[in-house]
Image (spheres, rainbow, N blue to C red):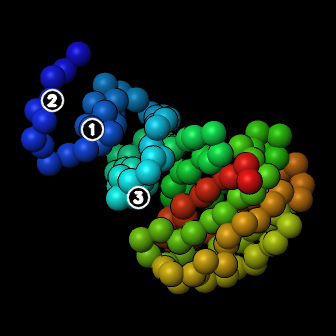
Amino acid sequence: MEKISFKKDETDTELALDYAIKKGATKVTILGAFGTRMDHVLANIYLLEIACNKGVSCQLVNSKNRIELLSSSRTFKKSESFGKYISFFPWNGDVAHLTLKGFVYELDDLFLEKSCIRGISNEFEKEEAMVSFEEGKLLCIESVD
């Protein structure tokens, strides 16, 4: 157990993530990341990028949502999904050549500007669904309701 000073520049969650990565973690699930303080919720979402930039898969999970940052294309399985809905948002920049297949709302080679919310509230149509893109990062949010 490490003692941490009360006065520090990092959040407790950031220090815990850094500790896990230094110990060799390649996949991290953070629980308790969604509370009543929106500044802390947003800070925890930014931790996904810190992990991603270090090659570590990281997700934030509560009873209603699972959030992760995608830096490359991925195939999803409906049977392994967290909830009914899945949303994709450009993260910290534009996303080029976005294609969604196997979802109710499919996209084909779309350019999403940083502030575009077109990827919100999609659903699986097939057992396997694919998201592919060539540039940028996507924030993926799976929701129960």
Residue 123 as seen in the image, left or right of residue 39? right
For the N terminus, the image quarter is: top left
Q: Residues within 10 Å of mark 3 (few under 14, many from 20)?
A: few
Disc 1/disc 2 C-alpha distance (Å): 9 Å
Residue that mark 3 sits on: 38
Q: Quadrant of residue 86?
A: bottom right
Nearer the N terminus, badge 1 or badge 3? 1
Which residue is painted at 53% across and 71% down in the image? Answer: 90
Residue 130 as seen in the image, left or right of residue 133? right
Identify the mark at residue 4; answer none if there is no mark. Answer: 2
Q: Quadrant of residue 125?
A: bottom right
Residue 130 as seen in the image, left or right of residue 118? right
Nearer the N terminus, badge 2 or badge 3? 2
Disc 1/disc 3 C-alpha distance (Å): 16 Å
Q: Is residue 33 above or below residue 21?
A: below
Task: Specify the amino acid type for callout 1.
Answer: Asp
Identify the mark at residue 12; answer none if there is no mark. Answer: 1
Q: Nearer the viewer, mark 2 or mark 3?
A: 3
Mark 1 and 2 residues: CB-CB less than 8 Å, in contact? yes
Q: Position of residue 129 (x, y in %)?
A: 80, 56
Q: Is residue 25 above or below residue 107?
A: above
Task: Specify the amino acid type for callout 2.
Answer: Ile
